[in-house]
Image: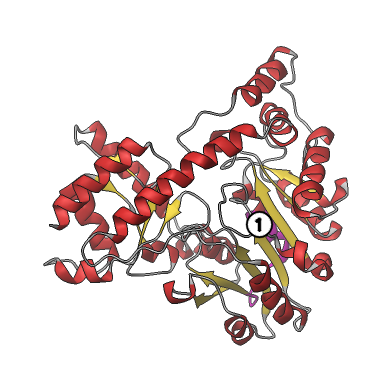
Amino acid sequence: MDFKLAERVGRVKPSPTLAVTARAQELRAAGKDVIGLGAGEPDFSTPAHIAAAAIAAIEEGFTHYTAVDGIPELKAAIADKFRRDNKIEYAPDQILVSTGAKQTLYNLCQALLNAGDEVVIPAPYWVSYPAMALLADATPVFVSAGPEQRFKLQPEQLEAAITPHTRLFMLNSPSNPAGTAYTRAELEALAEVLRRHPQVVIVTDDMYEHIYWADEPFCSLLTCAPDLYDRTVTVNGVSKAYAMTGWRIGYCGGPVDLVKAMKKVQSQSTSNPCGISQKAAVAALAGDQAPVAEMTRHFKERHDYLAAALDDLPAVDCLAGDATFYLFPDVRGAIERIDGISDDTGFAEFLLDKAGVAVVPGVAFGAPGHVRFSFASSMETLQEAMRRIRRALD
């Protein structure tokens, strides 16, 4: 049967990061030796005390539906986390637990946006932001922030991008894919612009908050601009910091009416997130934080090695990051040196074919001429990947 699909499906493409991971897996299955540096997933196992909490939940028979917005003890742990780490106060009815932060953000777009609304998205951006806006019938407005400004939006750029149709501003710090984080002063400057535009709702995606090593402490937007509290949604989750990507728990705090609307969207899509995963998330947020620090120590070591190794490649410029497990080198010079390659997509294909290393093209993040490297792999794997890449480029 020839189906006529909904127009909204045609507006978006499959996630390119997932596509790269799937391609690498297919090549491995076919017998090709491929190193995958595309996936945004820690290579560590979930800490034992978190897994133990999930096992206990199963043994206790905690296997039924929960409240759509999350179990009370998890919402309490989330409120404690926001208070402890970010100096933000949220009541239980201001918190929503979802099946990953991706669903949290999707719920927000569905609850807030209408046709004709504009969403300001700094580029480079996480690949799903524009798709979420498009699926809500809104228009993404991209503002380029290149390496010369450390991939961070400047206040004058934000001011120029906002129109009477702007409904949402999406801020991601620390950044996927760039690995850079806004300082407190930089956030205060953006907040000054946002104060002049009260119609704009703000969502700040803080997913990589704890995988962080910049000299200045991490700062969330409301920590330095509490007067924007009534129109800001703060999003986070347990996937990255606690190596819990498969557990699928994200959460947010925000204005009660908006969170209530997001809960309504979720109630008609997935209902509650997995109860067992919620019990595990309680242990993650309220339990021993030492494993997070230990994993971050390894990520920092890998970052330092890979940033230097990439920057040492011919015609590649790599900006060191402040956080996350990504680097986003500028490969435009390297592209010019390779016959038959004209863009970052071709460059990524070149690395996959000639070096057996899978990375994600920068065009997927709104930044052509770059590629994203994930260093959520062992040091030995990263060293072997760089040996292969250097041979291919030489």
Q: Residue furthest front?
A: 215
Q: Secondary structure at mark 1?
A: loop
Tag 1: Cα neighbours inside 10 Å, few (<14), some, or many (≥20)?
few
Residue 324 horizontal side relative to residue 183, left or right: left
Q: Is residue 114 visible?
A: no
**Residue, x 48% and y 46% (percent of image)?**
300
Disc 1 designates what residue?
217
**Residue, x 32% and y 66% (percent of image)?**
317
Amino acid type of the residue that numbered disc 1 sits on in the rendered structure: Pro
Q: Quadrant of residue 232?
A: bottom right
Q: Is residue 106 magenta?
A: yes
- Residue 334 higher or lower than 2, as above or below: below
**Along the line of sight, the residue nearer the viewer: 11 or 350:** 350
- Residue 209 higher or lower than 141, as above or below: above
Residue 390 in percent (x, y) is at 19, 52
Magenta-drawn segment:
105-118
**Along the line of sight, the residue nearer the viewer: 162 or 336:** 336
